[in-house]
Amino acid sequence: MSPRVLDALKRRLGGGSGDPTPGADGPWRPPLVPLKLKTIDEAFALPAVESVADLGGVWAVEAGYSFHALENHAPERAVLVDDDITAGVRERAAAFPQFQLLEQNFGLERTPADVGPIGVVLLFDVLLHQVNPDWDEILRRYAQHAQAFAIVNPMWSPADLPHGTGDTVRLLDLGEERYRQAVPPQDNIDGLFDRLDEVNPKRGRPWRDVHDVWQWGITDADLRAKLDELGFVVAFAEQHGRWRGLADFEDCAYVFHRA
Ligand SMILES: C[S@@+](CC[C@H](N)C(=O)[O-])C[C@H]1O[C@@H](n2cnc3c(N)ncnc32)[C@H](O)[C@@H]1O
């Protein structure tokens, strides 16, 4: 799905706060990415995975990956954590008594304990947005509670370097020109570099630290090294070429489980 299609979806969902559009065969559902569905299915194939926490599962997909897990894997418990939970998600979630919704930042110190012991933590297109705490600290905090991680993320693989040789970068440090070249076009990039130290009123933190913009280029090697350090091994990994046509990111999916 291109960023433009995602924006169109978001508009169709009323800026992320409306109900799904009804269709002829029932409520309209946002399209889901097959690689993400496959990654969930791979995680639930692991014996220790009987519950799921979907961190940042709402924008443009209306918790579709949580509902896929609920409808196809009958987890004993499911938790969705997102800063912006919509009315449509709440309405659909009401049919699943084992599904808990937490409308809060999943990077807060207390949130992993609020989620509790969990089979698999889904991190789909969210790790690259995490600052203060950074993506690797998020992994460390949830590793204490999780049996597995399912991660789908655009991974940093800069086009101007031999494959596999780049370092993880804070994208804003690249400067505005290179930043714009690397990441998808988004309305909130206009003027971003002029207001990095201004507080974003919705998030209560400077713009340079909000999860609404692309923050990190994380390399495949650094992600694997972090999970290895935390005591997790790879159960599944696929790489699907350039992420939505971007020259510097690859479309990668992983399941890691506790060794
Ligand atoms: C790019 S969307 C990804 C949505 C979905 N996981 C997917 O794969 O399509 C990011 C979502 O994560 C949420 N989010 C990102 N960082 C967050 C954080 N630290 N705490 C709570 N929600 C967060 C945003 O509100 C948004 O709903």
Image (spheres, helix red, strand yellow):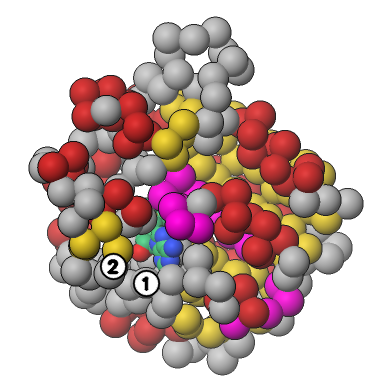
Q: Is residue 63 above or below residue 239?
A: below
Count neighbours of disc 2 (C-alpha within 10 A) and say few if under 14, some if 14 to 19, many if 20 or more.
some
Residue type of the residue flagged with mark 2: Arg
Give the residue drawn at x 30%, y 76%. 86
Give the residue drawn at x 75%, y 66%. 144
Residue with the mark numbered 2: 203
Task: Name the residue at the front extreme.
Answer: 197
The disc at residue 83 is: 1
Tell me if the residue at label 1 has its CB under 8 Å from ligand 1.
yes
Give the residue drawn at x 22%, y 70%. 202
Element type at marker 1? loop
The spot of residue 104 in percent (x, y) is: 42, 77
Viewed as shown, does residue 245 lie left or right of 176? right
Closer to the camera: disc 1 or disc 2?
Answer: 2
**Magenta span has 234?**
no
Q: Quadrant location of the N terminus?
A: top left
Q: Nearer the viewer, residue 207 or 253?
A: 207
Disc 1 and disc 2 in contact, CB within 8 angstroms:
yes
Residue type of the residue flagged with mark 1: Asp
Give the residue drawn at x 78%, y 43%. 228
Splitting the image into four quadrants, where does ligand 1 fall?
bottom left
Viewed as shown, does residue 41 lie left or right of 135? right
The spot of residue 131 in percent (x, y) is: 44, 53
Q: Which residues are magenta?
A: 114-133
The disc at residue 96 is: none
Q: Is residue 88 above or below residue 14?
A: below
